[in-house]
Amino acid sequence: MSEDNKEAPSTYGLMQLVPGSALWQALMSRQEDQRDGLAAVVEFHHVTRQLLADVAQCLGQSFSRPESRRNFVRALAALFEGNTYCLRKICLVKLKTTAPRALSSAELETIVSGRSKDAETKIRHVLNGSYKLFEISAAIDAKSEEWKRVEQLLARRHRLVHPNTVADLEVTDDESRGAILTAAWLREQFEVVLGFITSGTPDEVAARF
């Protein structure tokens, strides 16, 4: 294991999938839907760990350098888009055995097709859809101040990736500090559902699918 991986922040309390572990044995012995669900959860864990390592590396650099601030915003956006992609796969497995009655048509369309008008809408629809599929009492309020900050973070990343002017490449100190708070809040929203799914024994995790 590289030094970067050793120092990467932990992810959602999920044990790593290694041959011979309890999770490995549970994964190999399940019915197809449960096996697919566990595999999707494990993929979430590994993708998140790699992306968090990128974020941690950015945090170790001086934010006095404009390129460091740009890299940090890009790394955060990649983390949450990666989280969303993996959580969507978890939801697709859950939909095989769970009627989507509680989901809005927009949430269901986003989860099934993977399409939405923008990144922030996809994140919100997948998170809210996952809460409903796993019967978790939580919801993202699109009008909340926290969510507006998420939209601002992703809009800033969009300008960084698709710049038209020099101003599009600027990330201020205030934006950098705000991005840290926004990232902490959004990670908590993913932890709500992943923490629920991965709590308990491998048998209990598998039973949620």
Image (spheres, helix red, strand yellow):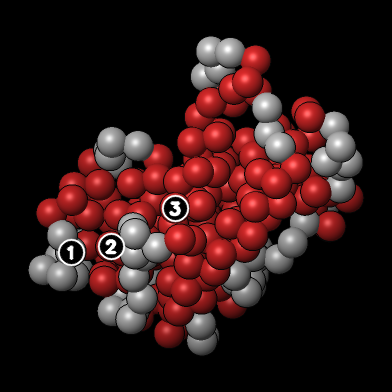
For marks 1 and 2 on the same chain, the one whose residue lies earlier in the sequence: 1
Depth check: 143 or 58 in front?
143
Task: Pinpoint residue 209: horizontal percent, then vertical percent.
Answer: 32, 72
Using the image, tell me which numbered label, if any, was put on residue 148.
Answer: 3
Q: Residue at x 49, y 36 (%)?
A: 155
Depth check: 49 or 185 in front?
185
Quote the CA–CA distance across marks 1 and 2: 6 Å
Quote the CA–CA distance across marks 1 and 3: 23 Å
Q: Is any atom of residue 25 visible in this view?
A: no
Indicate the amino acid at tag 3. Lys
Residue neighbourhood size for the residue with mark 3, other residues' Cα within 10 Å, grouped as few (<14), some (14–19), many (≥20): some
Indicate the amino acid at tag 1. Leu
Q: Quadrant of residue 73?
A: top right
Indicate the amino acid at tag 2. Gly
What residue did someone put label 2 on?
129
Q: Quadrant of residue 188?
A: bottom right
For residue 120, above or below residue 14: above
Residue neighbourhood size for the residue with mark 2, other residues' Cα within 10 Å, grouped as few (<14), some (14–19), many (≥20): many
What residue did someone put label 1 on?
103
Cβ atoms under marks 1 and 2 closer than 8 Å: yes
Q: Is any atom of residue 44 visible in this view?
A: yes
The label nearer to you, 1 versus 3, is 3
Q: Residue at x 60, y 56 (%)?
A: 183
Quote the CA–CA distance across marks 3 and 2: 19 Å
Q: Quadrant of residue 105?
A: bottom left
Task: Pinpoint residue 192: horizontal percent, then vertical percent.
Answer: 47, 74
Label 2 residue SS: helix
